[in-house]
Amino acid sequence: MNAVIKQIEKAQPFFQKVAANKYLRAVRDGFIALMPIIIFSSIFLLIANVPLIWHFAWPTKVANALNMFYNMSMGVLALMASSSVAKALTDSFNLDLPKTDQIPMVGVQFTAQVSFVLVAVDTLTDKMNNLYFAVAMIGTKGLICAFLVAFIVPNVYYQCFKHNITIKLPDAVPQNIAGAFKNIIPFAISTFFFWIFSLAFRAMTGTNLAAWIIQVLSPLFTAADGYFGLAIVYGAMAFFWFIGIQGPSIVEPAVTAIYLSNVELNLSAWKAGNIAGANRILAQGTQYFVATLGGTGATLVITLMFAFMSKSKELKAVGRAASIPVLFGVNEPILFGAPLILNPVFFIPFILTPIANVWLFKIFVDFFHMPGFIYNLPWTTPGTLGLIMGTGFSVGSIILAILLLVVDVVMYYPFFKAYDIQKCAEEEAKENAGANTVTNETQTETNANNAETDNSNSSGSGNNVASASKIPLARTKDGKNLNVLVLCAGGGTSGILAKALNKLAAENNLPLAVAATSFGAHHDLLSGMDIVILAPQMNAMKDELKKECDKNDAKMITTTGKQYIDMTQHADKCLDMIIANISE
């Protein structure tokens, strides 16, 4: 097994390049911007439809009002995605352009939206010759078409700005007016291209591009929803995470459109009373609350095993520290703390448990007619609760939630026992071989801590942390606070470190302000930051982030898994590292 892991490690640089691909990243980052639409609109959907389970129906006007919010938000999701994905891709292109000649975001966004409408929307007229837009393809069904448009438009803008293809005005014209004219040529090229393409395409196929894509890819969607396709999707997510690369960043962009479309189709069938027809498996809920119960690798049960069944002191401590984050889907503490990733002992259960979970889910849907996911919920919803809520509080989901925990225990238990025995042996050997050394080091450390405590008490601080005077405010941008940004994949892991640092700052009255967000949602925050800390799961993005930090005069700190976990538990050490970096 060690030989296999070594071979896998050799392929890591290639997969890191794939994860850092700007187009995959644009889809992921674009969808991060759309999450408020997806999640908040689903709340209205829940309020409108959950009472139907208990045979309560809202009055028609109330139901229409609740559904209106969903229809006017999720119903235009593809139109919004054409804009947000185009913006995310433009962010990448702007890193290669001079700061004085950046592609305007607003220009790219409205150009992408106009271009998408040209290829995805049909026009209709009534008997009174009034013009209407057919909006069937501007919701979740049109997402793939929206991605294609969002990839092309920023490329047109990039080439125009890179080669200075623009309308040149006299120097006397104010810069803001001259800047507006720089949009005209890339806007004209993009929209003219999609207009001509749309006319020709409709003439040849009799339909618009978005509808045609759905027709052509329908067999692929069906295949992806089968047992083999599900194993590929969720096995790949686990595999990439096992080698230290954030799996969803590679796999999700390829299936996001299917995810959202399937949930909408499931909901339509469920509302029509066709429970058996709500049978699509691929969905965000399947990823969050079935395949990756507790986080990628289905790590909820192994974390609880470490916490409450382990004889190893180290594993017990790691498990207990990670239990609460893992309950909410933040499993980096256990991935890097145990560690699970690149650990030969856990290769088999880490890959196969998610597959077993999603196959079991499909069996319940196919044979017991439990509905698939009909609602989108936040990824931080506790796993079993997310499964029950997301499938409409079906009885089958309650049984499945219990069964998934049992299956995961069975899958992980033999490997847990083997690793626990191994760690206990290592701990015993260390204790026997270095008892005197440990005693001496402990005494030395105690004395050092006492001395530091005495010094800090005498100076009036009383805490073993960097004092305010040690933070070089002269090197910060605003001269008032040391501003730090922590980045991870979804904002969960970064939030843990940011909370620890902010708590340290509050307790010791330090001029330190720390923010946390997901990679992709950070662009507008960078300009005000002095330091950016990159969580280890986003290591593939370090080159891209370095460019952004350099342009925004911010310093970047990259971390390893063990180091990051230690930083969350010892915020004072993290602060010392931050101060050392900004002082260089």
Image (cartoon, rainbow, N blue to C red):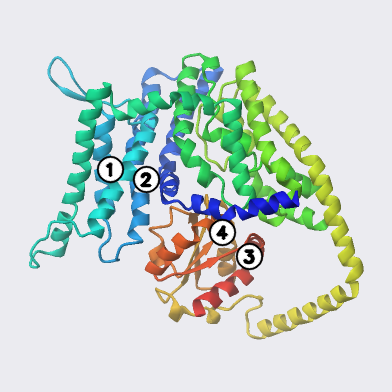
Tell me which label, 3 or 1, sits earlier in the chain.
1
Which one is in front, 502 or 209? Answer: 209
Judge the density around disc 2: few (<14), some (14-19), many (≥20) Cα neighbours within 10 Å: many
Q: Position of residue 413 (x, y in %)?
A: 80, 40
Q: Position of residue 538 (x, y in %)?
A: 54, 55
Residue type at mark 4 is Ala
Residue type at mark 1 is Ala
Which one is in front, 425 or 583? Answer: 425
List the residue tagged with mark 4. Answer: 535
> In terms of secondary structure, where does tag 4 sit?
loop
> In terms of secondary structure, where does tag 2 sit?
helix
Judge the density around disc 1: few (<14), some (14-19), many (≥20) Cα neighbours within 10 Å: many
Q: Residue at x 21, y 49 (%)?
A: 186
Visible in this render: residue 259?
yes
Visible in this render: residue 342?
no
Whether residue 361 is situated above or below residue 540 in the rendered picture: above
Q: Residue at x 33, y 46 (%)?
A: 86
List the residue tagged with mark 3. Answer: 567
Distance from disc 4 to disc 2, alpha carbons, whole Å, reads 23 Å
> What label sits on residue 85 in the rendered view?
2
List the residue tagged with mark 1. Answer: 112
Whether residue 377 is situated above or below residue 504 in the rendered picture: above
Tell me which label, 4 or 2, sits earlier in the chain.
2
Q: Please identify, in this view, whether the residue under mark 3 or under mark 4 is nearer the observer.
A: 4
> In terms of secondary structure, where does tag 3 sit?
helix
Distance from disc 2 to disc 3, alpha carbons, whole Å, reads 33 Å
Pointer 3 with pointer 1, Cβ within 8 A? no
Distance from disc 3 to disc 4, alpha carbons, whole Å, reads 11 Å
Residue type at mark 3 is Met
